[in-house]
Image: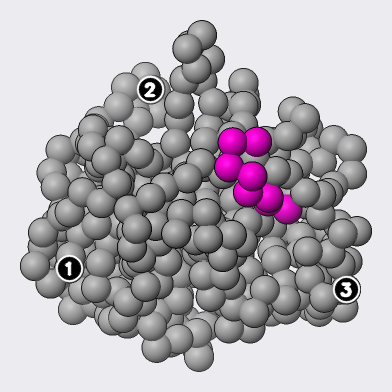
Amino acid sequence: MPAACFAPYTHSGSGITSWVLRAPAAVSTQSLYFGKPSTADDLRVLWFAWFTPWAGLASAGRMLGFVDMDSGTVTWLPDHQFADGGAAVDPATGDVIWASGRHVWRRAADASAMPRRLGSLPYEMVKGRLLKRLVTQPSVSADGSRLLLDTRIGLRCFLGAIDLAEGTYEPWFSSKGHFNHAQFSPGDPDVALIAAEDEADESTGILRRYTQRMFLYHRDGHFHPVGPGGRKVGHEVWGASGRSIWFIDFTQGVMRLDITTGESELVWPRNGWHAHASACERYVVCDHRSSSKQGVAFYVLRFLNRVTGKSIQFARMAIPEDDEQHQHPHPRFCAGDAAIVYTMQMDGRAAVAIAATADLIAATG
């Protein structure tokens, strides 16, 4: 790692070293939401979110930045703001795609690059209405033709897609139910995974709770539940092949759903809050909330080698007292699975961190 912009952090229990991005005083950095990568496949660029204590909430106030991993230079982009998890990297090019207002933008990891608008939600859809979310996180179809939007306007949710060649919006369906975390299948350009979310009454704050978390939506309009029912399921993400979905059963651990059979398998008992698998699915990384004997809660990062059955803890950190910026560790395999990118907590600030997958494989071999 470029020594000028990264500092080493070595976990005392495992000896695994992560590399933590240096930042100016009062600036925190974060990895992008774990549903999509934060880096190019060749690790020549790392995109991240950054914020200051006075910058607002996760829904508004975070900005984009990137690291040129060859030169070791960091570019901060204070005019590139995004909401929620609304930014993701195209791993083939290293470009970033992000949402702002009703628009979706794209730019290269070059300090002189100009953003290019990919498309927008039609103005007629939001005129006089409150746009609460354009997209949870940008997701491009397997054939590269469309970008999925899980939009929330007022009390309704809208699923649709932007045609990337034309820049036009294609509506799919709308619902009074609260759906989000929409993700195109990596293997089928006409299938998306969507998740149900609790709905809060805006006057009372009382929740209307979901009873089925995961659904598959087909572009022909077919829509059906997948995975377990009830409220114990969450934090779902596609496997790289599109033949599996990885998710957390909060009563059991890390789970894998086989799309073909519809069967769910418990892969990693008693672990997991957010989990992600390598493309080969032999390795899994997760974050987890734990407590000390004194009852103090903290986050830990763990790695599972499914070949040997061994696992290892490679990071431990305090939980922020106030988490209005959604500072969860959110680990994810990136750079062709060569690295794990996550958010660390150090010295009262969040910081984006990278660990080498090869080190973790060697430690669990």
- In which quadrant of the rendered image does the C terminus lie? bottom left
User: Could you tell me which residue is drawn at 37 percent across and 73 percent down?
Assistant: 280
**Image position, residue 47 (x, y; %):** 69, 63
Residue at numbered disc 1: 259
Q: Which mark is residue 28?
A: none
Q: Examine the image and state in which quarter residue 242 appears.
A: bottom left
Mark 3 or 2, closer to the camera: 3
Q: Amino acid at mark 3?
A: Ser
Q: Nearer the viewer, residue 66 or 211?
A: 66
For mark 2, does the 10 Å Cα neighbourhood hold few (<14), some (14 to 19), or many (20 or more) residues? few
Residue highlighted by disc 3: 71
**Residue 160 location, x and y as percent?**
36, 69
The quadrant in which the N terminus is found is bottom right
Q: Secondary structure at mark 3?
A: loop
Q: Which amino acid type is marked by label 2?
A: Gly
The magenta segment is 12-19
In the picture, residue 118 is in which quadrant?
bottom right
Q: Is residue 43 left or right of residue 13?
A: right
Residue at 35% in and 39% down: 271
Which quadrant of the structure image shows residue 257?
Answer: bottom left
Read off the residue under disc 2. Answer: 205
Q: Is residue 292 left or right of residue 315?
A: left
Q: Tell which circle, 3 or 1, labels the residue nearer the N-terminal end.
A: 3
| First reached walking from the N terminus: tag 2 or tag 1 | 2
Marks 2 and 1 close (CB-CB < 8 Å): no
Residue 38 horizontal/vertical position (percent): 61, 64
